[in-house]
Amino acid sequence: MTVGIVVVSHSRALADAAVALAGEMLRDGGGPVEVAAGLDDGSFGTDAVAIGDAVTRADQGDGVVVLMDLGSAVLSAELALELLDDDVRDGVVLCPAPLVEGLIVAAVSAAGGAPSAEVAAEAADALQAKAIHLVPGEPDRDQPDQTVDDGDGPEQRGVFTVRMAHGLHARPAAQLVQALRGLDAEVRLRNLTLDGPDVSGASLSKVATLGALQGHDVAVRARGPEAGEAIRRVLDLADDDFGEAAAVSPPRPPATPATTGEPIPASPGVGVGPVRVERAVAVDVPPARPGTPAEQRARLDEARARVRDDLQTVRDRAAREIGEAEAAIFDAQLLLLEDPDVLADVGARIDAAVDAARAWADALDEVGSRLAAAADEYMRARVRDVRDVRDRVLRDLGGLEQHDAAGDGILVADDLTPADAAALDPARTPAVVLAGSSPTAHAAILLRARGVPAVVAAGPALVARAREAAVLAVDGTTGEVVTDPDPPTLSDFRARAEALTRRRENALRRAHEPAVTRDGTTVLVGTNVGGAGDAEAAVGADLAGLVRTEFCFLDRHRAPDVDEQEAAYRAIAEAMGGRRVTLRTLDVGGDKPLDYLPMPREANPFLGVRGLRLALARPDLLADQLHAFVRVAHDHPVDVMFPMVTTVDELVAARRALDDAVVTVGRGRPAGLRVGIMVEVPAAALKAPAFAPMVDFFSIGTNDLTQYALAAERGNDAVAPLSDGLDPAVLALIAATAGGAGRADHDVLVAVCGELAGDEDAAALLIGLGVRELSVAPTAVATVKEAVRAVDLTQARALAAAARECPDAHAVRELLR
């Protein structure tokens, strides 16, 4: 039995988000879920004709359940029924359940094969569960001794010990909450070590405030039909350290000084220049607006939806321009917008006749206060993220523009939001000085990724002096901040900065010259791009060594068609001015999913369906993309590159799909069209001789290769010291790739497009291992070319051999020095 579901909402974004949330509850898919939301022009509203069409699409012969958000949506749904044929209309149930909770329960029930009446009844019960939960005078949910026996059997219990270096922080907390979603069980957790209160396992904000540090014991108890399964999932996650390595405790940055205000280095580099003061602008709670509780909720839901879209846009841009690991910083903020415990708190306040804006502000202030009181500095650093989400929603409710941190000069501020840090232009911001924050704050992480020197925890006194200064001298490596420096000090800082500048300028002057080693070996230096703007910024690049085509697919509600993709790729090719472009096929998966490409939850998405595996599973997406590639290749030199290749069979299937695209375009095979694969997993490196006859080049993604070779997840602070591309094991895999390339009957180029390619100190080592192309960030092209020009191939080969004999990455770095 397959019951269809139709979601009717005034907001397309809200409906899509609700469907995505419901999808997370289903491991093995489910029945059809159709959306009829918003109007054709993108504005808010409902359309009876669209609802009728959605019902027709969802009807598989076993009935359709329709869930609606607001009053006029009900009227539109009723009108839609009148437009349907009798046989379809008789099987439709208009359900009075709350949209989000009802949809989640309905989707799970329908996936289990329940008939339409039962699906609607289960959805309606979601409202009853919430009503009981919020009845005044009921026992406090945070008091364990007030749990009652509701006939669901005995309470299930368990205990685990936190082993991660950073404790149960936002990322593992999010994993825990997601693992429990969809289970028919109420789960509570308590930090036994701190003898703290119970918190709900369904709330990210509450779990994160347990203050559970490395070594703390956490008790778990569950009640309900699936209590045993809930306990098992939590303990399995804990046993796996929530996907994070716990054995290694990396050096922690010094704690933010409580009273001294002694500055802490947060991002290396030197900056000298005028002061740009960024004063914190308090976001006032907008004046109350009249409305029923339902109208207040709707107003808040619409504001949250818009903020979610804005944050998703920031995240997608950061993924393109900075990197996926850094972009994941915004995931916790996106989760906070949907946190069920926060929304329950806000809803209770609204039911008590509190205005939506005031209810949101007070609830988020409470979350921030709990985090600020945490014992762990890493957890306290998350307060700024919470405040940012609070303020963004309040600005939207008040009709205010979002804050813009653009400007010129050394930025001096009390703090910085992650979004503002991601948006800073290094060319306009020589350095950043913050009164608060810490090296582990998300803003600091993003500043390092953007290459902006930064000092944090400078204290209010130093920042006050800095704001009054005409000139600042900042060293993000040592933590020095000097206000209006005297001539000798200014001279010293300027000498440091000018030395870096001269080196960069000299490199830029020669950027368009080939990168040739001292003994005459040419090494191509290309650029990694995510759009035409990156290509234009890559002065001197010999080619686009990696085009992240994901930029076409992000921040959308549907996949781009062939024409849209062709236009985007052609713009990049034209920006490269006739130089070769390497178009990588779509590289997404469980770790970076697309809204319109629902995927089952994977315990370890990095080892799941991603890259070429996903493309081969969705041949329609791959066919469209290759079709666009071939069209562009008839007018520009194009390399096609397949990511996450593990087996020869995968490459054979991918090449067959490319051949089919050539036939579809109908103009023959483009001259100069080349094919390559990314070497990202050890298996591909070790099987390079098997792949070599079928490719024109290998491009080594050292970020992923390092992750898989060293079992150290990218972006995981707890194992950051392990995740070093200069580890001898990674170098051995690079050498194996180059060795396999040399065994082909034709020339197979070996490139590196990962982070290691941009490390100037590593250039000689990579060249000595057999690499002949380095693809780097647009701003690094010129300096990497200079590093190549200083290399002697004979010495580089000797260096590579010595490095492979080193015991660890630290020894390799000492050898490079």
Image (cartoon, rainbow, N blue to C red):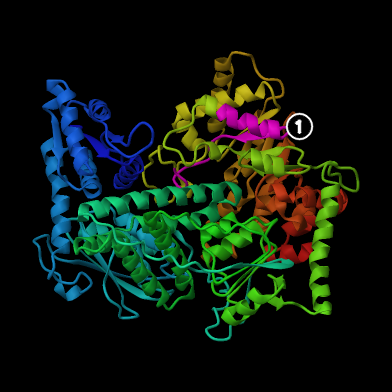
Q: Can residue 728 be seen here? A: yes
In which image quadrant can residue 74 be found? top left
Q: For the magenta stretch, what is the residue range?
A: 565-593
Give the class, few, some or many, for how many residues have Cα within 10 Å of label 1's Cα (few <14, many ≥20).
some
In percent of width and height, residue 813 lies at 73, 64
In percent of width and height, residue 310 lies at 46, 49
Above or below: residue 213 compared with residue 283 = below
- Determine whether, in the image, residue 379 is placed left or right of residue 270: left
- Provide the residue designation for mark 1: 747
Q: Tell me the quadrant of the picture where the N terminus can be found.
A: top left
Tell me the residue at 56%/21% (across/down): 661
In which image quadrant can residue 202 be found? bottom left
Farthest residue toward the bottom?
259
Query: Hey, what amino acid is under mark 1?
Result: Asp
353 or 96, which is in the foreground?
Answer: 353
Residue 708 located within the stretch drawn in magenta: no
In percent of width and height, residue 169 lies at 43, 67
In percent of width and height, residue 596 lies at 40, 37
Farthest residue toward the left?
151
Above or below: residue 646 compared with residue 215 = above
Tell me the residue at 59%/45% (across/down): 680
552 or 805, which is in the foreground?
Answer: 552
Q: Tell me the quadrant of the picture where the C terminus can be found.
A: bottom right
Tell me the SS state at disc 1: loop
Q: Can residue 62 be seen here? A: no
Tell me the residue at 23%/72% (across/down): 142
